[in-house]
Amino acid sequence: MASPGPVSTSGPVQGAGLGESPSMSTEKLSSSAVNRMLMEFLIYCGRAVFVFYPVYLTGYLGLSISWVLLCMFMLTWWKKNRQWKDARIGSAIDFVDNEKQTINTELKASLQMASWVNFTDVEKVQWLNKVLEQAWPFFGMYMEKLLRENIQKSVRACNTALKAFTFTKIHFGRIPLKITGIRAYTHEVEHREVILDMNLSYAGDVDINAQVNSAITAGVKEVKLQGMMRVILEPLIGQAPLVGGVTFFFIRRPTLEINWTGMTNVLDSPAFGSLSEDTIIDIIASLMVLPNRMCIPLIDQVKMDQMRFPLPRGVVRVHLLEARDLVAKDTYMMGLVKGKSDPYATLRVGNRNFKSKTIKENLHPKWNEVYEFVVHEAPGQELELELYDEDTDKDDFLGRYNLDLGEVKREKQMDQWFALEDIQHGEVHLKLQWFSLQTDTSLMKESTDNLACAMLAVYLDNATDLPKDGREAADRHKHGKNPKEARLTKRAACPNSFVEFSVDKDVKKSKVVYASKDPVWEEGFTFFVRNVKAQQLSIQVKEPEKKNPLGVLNLPLSRLLNTSGLTLDQRFLLERSGATSQIKLKATLRILKLEEPPPKPIVSPPSEVKQQQTKQAGNTSVSSPSNAPSSSNAVSSKEIPVVSTPKQVPTSPNEGYLAQRRGSFQAPENRKESSSSANLRRFDSHSLLSENSIASSRFDLSDGATYPEAIRNHQGSFGEIELVIRYATLRHKLVVIVNKCRNLFPCSENGTDSYVRLYLLPDQTWKHRKKTHVKKRTTDPVFNEKVEFDVLLEQAQTRKLDVSVKNNKMLVSRERKDIGSVIIDLSEIDLVKGITAWYELTLPGLKK
């Protein structure tokens, strides 16, 4: 049972009266708690009277219940109509504020815009499309030969009912494949490779007909395919043809639409359409979607298995911690009463996906779950996170967020809140860790929390001399017949086979090779290992839909610890199989090492400058702003002197990415930062103030005012604020949208009554003061308020924005109301495009 309110204890009572009870004198409810309880009770009673009085009045007057239902219907209609009008007016205002951005958003939603329009670093390659258009008829000739000579034979061999399968017509049409944009990676990758990302779009007039037998025909009339293909040129060599090999694959599954003809028209029905297209996408994924690749070696020195299945880039461990401020999807009484949601999350990287547990009736769920993903390409692969509200019929969408894993590889460790997209509001808290793959066994630490300590990569090549079925394998194992005796006793047949790998409960299967005693698979698999010395890799060669295996093999993982490079690459004899039955595979073990984040850039001046500033500060008065050190903020409110600070040289190349908020497909102008101090300028107001000595009333310490004792003793963060800053060119106004704050300093046990105050420096008069409404009793207030400043664009680009979060209640009038503040240099922001970012709140004038 919940306690009635907070209890204040003030220590032992001195001089208690004779009639006072000791319990009453030591524990008392605070007045604020009592007032809050009374107010909540009165509000509850008012709502109850408002809801139930019309029902009582209807019964008292003897009216029909239909009047109540009619009133509820009218109220619901009025509410929905009002929301529609507000949305229409709001969209019109947003259009006036930012016409260019609104038009671009609508065009993206209605048209399939080329990628080079949305991303400036993606190039338009019209010349390549002209080459494809010229070569398309010859591509059709090549595909016709491939289908008739290879695919047709494979289809006939896979099933006896398809022995008469024949392609009667093959025509790839006149519309060629188009490349809507291409992006080249040269600086982000190794110096001996070039990576190209090509956005493919194909809407072709394909006309392919096939005949299964005289009565059954099938065909395809039109095909639509869209996706992003990555092409890797490696290794670069110093002789012709300058490239050792070409590898290409889809990073994510492409989208596919097919118009079927003939007997396959039934696949266009809703019941079978997704089945057929998903089956074809699965076939494409088994060949050309990560981790599978198509490779073309151009020199003999390149090994095919290393090109097709290189070792992964690393491992990402994702901690799904919590979410907050989710949208309430469950409603009652025809939408009049809003409930909550039953959220769960889905996480996907490539073809590996997970689903979290469901938290019932909670808009601030906490999962605290951990997932591990193997990363094959970074940058490129993305963590795809989606949140849903679990329902009995159809789950409601609660938002998504995609994070390029190249950003995690740069930062090594990330622990932050991410705003959900395609939804009104909501955030998710993730902690991401990057693990590199090492061969040093001394780094191995056995897992105690059921998490991986190593990764196993298996490359399955082929098998030789398999028995025709499981029964023959059992007979060979039991009676010891050699292959010649088996062939004499019964006619030999070629089996259909696949391989099943398992490490404990993690089971993976290869593709099926039909009618072959010497099948060739050429596939790669990865497993997470939690105890190298105790676990083993179990291998079974099986037939589809049959129980008896064609051969088995158990490989202890501890055996890899004693090999060179932690790798075994050889042929293994199969147990419970033929005397000469073998399987060829390559097993590689790698130790997971948690990478430490790159060192933070030091924004303080060198020691010599600090000593000079200290000497100057000791010989001059604090009230003199021109001679004061840059870390001091005792400046006049009328003057804005600028103290030059030596530029800091980045300590590592990774520091250039600290200001990025999203993945590798950002426009390059958003990433231009010349120094480490510039990288932190968006987030660290203290370093900005030390560099520029901005005058502000809240930094003037000469009046003797101090901060509250709780704030002066606080050692952690004071919170963060999210702002949207842009310039409305049509109305000549600087628009600042105060979205929300998070993790503010709690000024009382009930939270903080906070509001935001803004100045456009150097204007600091009451006339130019802007402020938001007060949000009570919360440390995560949501404002969603817009303020505007009348200023020309040229002037705005030379000004600075002073933002301060203040507490509305202070018991002592002389104490400062500041909770945190930040100063934003508008010259570093593209105001026409706008920016949305989180800024850390600090109190630079605070003396500790």
Image (cartoon, grey):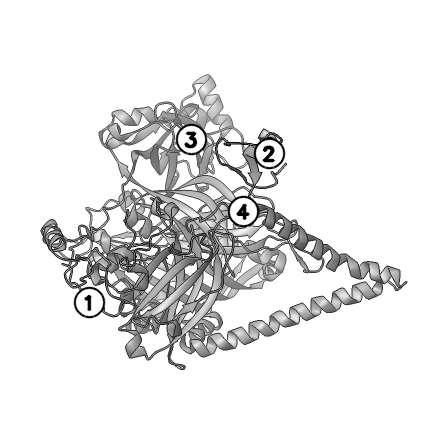
Residue type for callout 4: Tyr
Residue on which disc 3 sits: 450
**Residue name at image x 45 percent, y 62 percent:** 739
Examine the image and state in which quarter residue 538 appears.
Answer: top left
Q: Who is closer to the viewer here, 427 or 514?
A: 427
Disc 1 to disc 4, how far (Cα)?
53 Å
Q: Which residue is mark 4?
A: 344
Q: Secondary structure at mark 4?
A: strand
Q: Kindly identify the amino acid type of the residue bearing the numbered disc 2.
A: Met
Task: Answer few, some or many: residues within 10 Å of disc 2's Cα (few below 14, many 20 plus, some between 14 and 19).
Answer: few
| Residue at far top of view | 479
Of callouts 1 and 3, which one flags the residue occurring earlier in the amino acid sequence? Answer: 3
Marks 1/2: CA–CA distance: 59 Å
Which residue matches tag 1?
641
Position of residue 648 measured from the top left corner of the image (x, y, whole percent): 16, 56
* Front-lying residue, 491 or 107: 107
Residue 422 to residue 719: above or below = below
Which of the pair 158/638 is nearer the observer? 638
Badge 1 marks a residue whose secondary structure is loop
